[in-house]
Amino acid sequence: MTTPHADGPETDKAAWAGGDAEDVAAAQAVDDTSGATPAEAVEGEIVEDDPAPTGGTDSVGAGDAPADDATAALQAQLDERTADLQRVSAEFANYRRRVERDRQAIIDTAKGSVLTELLTIVDDLERARAHGDLEEGPLKAFADRVHAVLASQGVESFGEEGDAFDPSVHEAVQDESEGSEPVLGTILRKGYRHGERTLRSAMVTVR
């Protein structure tokens, strides 16, 4: 009975068949080859993972700086244009107020000139009233109409006997005052004002 050869089944078969030394060596090579496992075959193979991309963060950071500079430049231009717009708006608002003020001054001057001319008619009507000619009749209706027109335009008369004397609006033709607070005596001609503008000063005596 033949004992199994220690080198493997193929060697045993060669020895059993009475093969020579070369057959035994060939069988031994087959045993060695077939005995290798797949794990042993790839044991030395090293598989490396894909390397992480480098420089990505640096490139993003480098790209942010020009973007920030462009944003800052646009913001500076926007602020400058906004300031220019605000300045132009303020200048235009001042111009409109100035034009409106000048226009109103021209209107008031023209209106004051016309109203001043009407005051001569009012003086004649007042003298007629003093003589009793305006008690009734068409002249009374005309006088009432003239006074209504003046009142509608904001014309007011001033200068009543006993009022405090004011040289800025009263024209004194006679001064009989003795105290420190003179008052109006006889009203020779009433004064008239239109708003804050004096159309005509009052002609009075002072006592």
Image (spheres, rainbow, N blue to C red):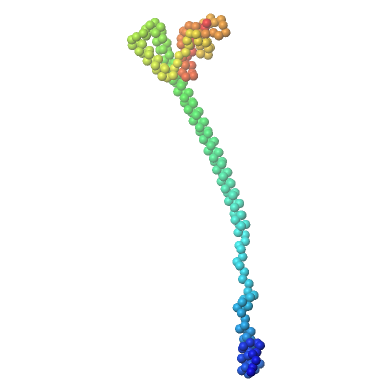
Residue at 60% across, 78% down: 38
Give percent across and percent down for residue 106: 46, 23
Residue pushed farthest front?
A: 1
Q: Is residue 26 visible?
A: no
**Residue 65, how many percent across, how many down?**
61, 51
Residue 32, position in %: x, y? 64, 84
Q: Is residue 145 above or below residue 72?
A: above
Residue 24 lies in quadrant = bottom right
The N terminus lies in quadrant: bottom right
Nearer to us in this view, 112 or 135: 135
Q: Is residue 169 visible?
A: yes
> Which residue is rendered at x = 45% and y = 23% of the image?
107
Task: Establish if 81 lies above or below 195.
Answer: below
Query: Which one is in front, 16 or 182?
Result: 16
Residue shown at the point (62%, 86%) measured from the top left: 30
Q: How many marks?
A: 0
Residue at x 45% of width, y 16% of height: 156
In the image, 42: left or right of 133? right
Task: Residue at the far left: name it.
Answer: 137
Give the percent coordinates (x, y) of residue 40.
Answer: 63, 78
Q: Is residue 163 left or right of residue 27?
A: left
